[in-house]
Image (cartoon, rainbow, N blue to C red):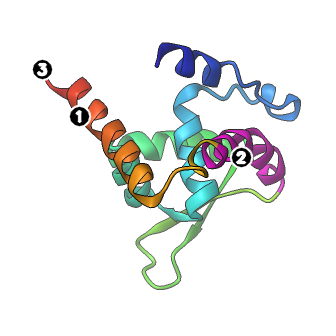
Amino acid sequence: MPRLVGRVKRIRVPEELQSLALAPRHLSLLAYLLFDGPMSVNALASQLEVAPATVSLMVSDLSRKGILERREDESDRRRTIVSISDEHRPSIDAWLAKGAMAWREALAPLTSAQRKMFVDTLKAYERALGEE
């Protein structure tokens, strides 16, 4: 597991994004927006398992840098919908796609039951890390 985490951390940030000072904490937020599409701050907070205020600060930071866009939810004007800007989407997609393709390649030979067992095992590992 440490080798896997170390390799993921070495995935280079694309040159066009390097000046934007993206931190590892931004990686998960960007991945959710890239793979799941635009969502509200509260939905992002739920996915990331952090407080909405934390996500709001990250979104503000990334919006100022032009990486994210915020717009009013047409069905509920109190909510803000966050998305990756069109300008930076190709770079972010190229950056994060390598990991997604690696997961697809690793999981492709497994049966549905084997993939479920793998995911369940990772979830059990995550839970065990969270125990005191």
Q: Which residue is mark 3?
A: 132
Q: Main secondary structure of the magenta part?
A: helix
Identify which amino acid the numbered label 1 is placed on.
Arg
Question: Alpha-carbon distance for marks 1 and 3?
Answer: 10 Å
The residue positioned 66% from the left and 29% from the top of the image is 22
Element type at mark 1: helix
Element type at mark 3: loop
Question: Within 10 Å of the Cα at label 2, are there few (<14), some (14-19), or many (20+) other Cα atoms?
Answer: many
Q: Which residue is mark 2?
A: 67
Residue 70 in the image: x percent, y percent? 60, 61
Q: Is residue 94 magenta?
A: yes
Task: Establish if 78 lies above or below 21.
Answer: below
The residue positioned 54% from the left and 52% from the top of the image is 32
Question: Alpha-carbon distance for marks 2 and 3?
Answer: 37 Å
Identify which amino acid the numbered label 3 is placed on.
Glu
Identify which amino acid the numbered label 2 is placed on.
Ile
Tell me the magenta residue range. 87-105
Q: CB atoms at circles 1 and 3 under 8 Å apart?
A: no
